[in-house]
Image (cartoon, rainbow, N blue to C red):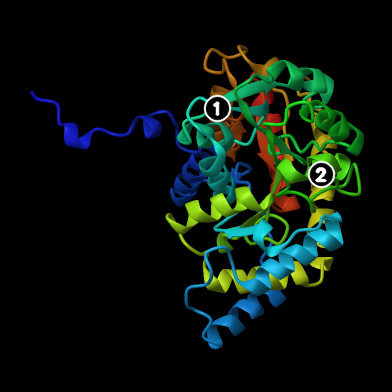
Amino acid sequence: MTKDLALELAQRIQRIKPSPTLAVSARAEELQAEGKPIINLGVGEPDFDTPEHIKEAAIRAIHDGRTKYTAVDGTKSLKKAIIDKFSRENHLNYEPAQILVSSGAKHSIYNLFTAVLNPGDEVIIPAPYWVSYPDMAKLADANPVIVKTDFSTHFKMTPAQLKAAITDKTRIVILNSPSNPTGMAYSASELKALGEVILHYPGIIVMSDDIYEHNLWNHLPFTNIVNACPELYDRTVVINGVSKSYAMTGWRIGYAAGPAKIIGAMKKAQSQSTSNPASISQYAAEAALSGDMKYVQLMTEAYKKRHDFLINEFKNIPGLKCLPSDGTFYTFPNIEAFLNRDPSVTNDIEFAEFLLTQANIALVPGSAFGTPGYVRLSYATSMENLEQAVANIKKALGSIQ
């Protein structure tokens, strides 16, 4: 039988894997459709509705006929709202040519990688990491360099680790604070120490993923590496969006701010891939960034209350180790004490499957985030669901004591 060359796939696509968090959510939805009472703690999505004033802005935009193409890099009014947001909240000053609006923060990251990475370049990624970072680097023909962190540093990369990971091929260092999946945030002094390492390497770009900026309760006020180390302003790209803070995941609006040369290259990449983000979503995002922040504060207060409940409950489960988070809506407990107690539960992937089938709980194995022996739980769900989830988990784990 001859090989069908026409159906051969590109090497870049064969290097990557589907998003494991989306796979977990799909599996949970399948079981729910079969009638099983699955509590989904795997999805990284706020359980709140988009605030009314944001939805009303979108409805007005539709009635006003704002349904045509916009500029590739976003409407002037949304870019102004983003610039005002950075000035007001982050004390960072940008010009319109330094802002790019994309179809989600993930799209912004993809544009950055496309714009600056060459084959063989290296991207330093602290683990645990958001699942898409390594694969997105591979799609750009670059090599992810994983820096392992653990309990001892609260899952944060140290300056010594960063320096040891840098080579003459290092092009990007990724910082995600507060972090998905750990919920940990870097303090201003920790960021300054990392920045002082990076300053010695003028060819390195910092990608500061600030998507959980407002979902924070420790290390306040929020600080990113440019605040802590202003000398890096000219080679830092700040990634953010409206998905998490404003419960707008489906609206698909993210944005990037950074050096005009890099942002211009990202715009060029976007112009030949997606063009502009959805016009209606842009007007909604403008209302989000310019409007009252009380809804964001209320959501974060709810996350903190749920976080405290889970941390207190986990303390009463022998063998389960869990550090309190600084923000987000995730916790990342160590479950190694429960492995190999049952022949079918020898790693974190099998542990997650065990809880799915025995406790009706969907969560994501730590292996997906580059850290085996852990699991990520999202508490972006009701307190009622969390109380039932804890009861189910305790009962299931009790069966393999």
Name the residue type under label 1: Asp
Q: Secondary structure at mark 1?
A: loop
User: Considering depth in this image, is 58 or 348 the residue closer to the camera?
Assistant: 58
Counting from the top left corner in percent of width and height, residue 128 is at 67, 28
Q: Secondary structure at mark 2?
A: helix
Counting from the top left corner in percent of width and height, residue 226 is at 81, 44
Residue 261 can be seen in this image: yes
Q: Residues within 10 Å of mark 2 (few under 14, many from 20)?
A: many
Mark 1 vs mark 2: which is more N-terminal?
Answer: 1
Name the residue type under label 2: Val
Q: Which mark is residue 226?
A: 2
Q: Is residue 300 left or right of residue 39?
A: right
Distance between mark 1 and mark 2 Cα atoms: 23 Å
Q: Which mark is residue 374?
A: none
State which quadrant residue 296 falls in: bottom right
Counting from the top left corner in percent of width and height, residue 208 is at 72, 42
- The single residue placed furthest to the left in the displayed view is 1
Quarter of the image with the C terminus in it:
top right
- The single residue placed furthest to the bottom in the displayed view is 64
Quarter of the image with the N terminus in it:
top left
Q: What residue do we see at 43% from left, 54% from top?
A: 273
CB-based contact (under 8 Å), mark 1 and mark 2: no
Q: Is residue 184 left or right of residue 28?
A: right
User: Considering depth in this image, is 396 or 196 the residue closer to the camera?
Assistant: 196
User: Considering depth in this image, is 104 or 38 the residue closer to the camera?
Assistant: 104
Residue 105 can be seen in this image: no
Residue identifier under label 1: 121
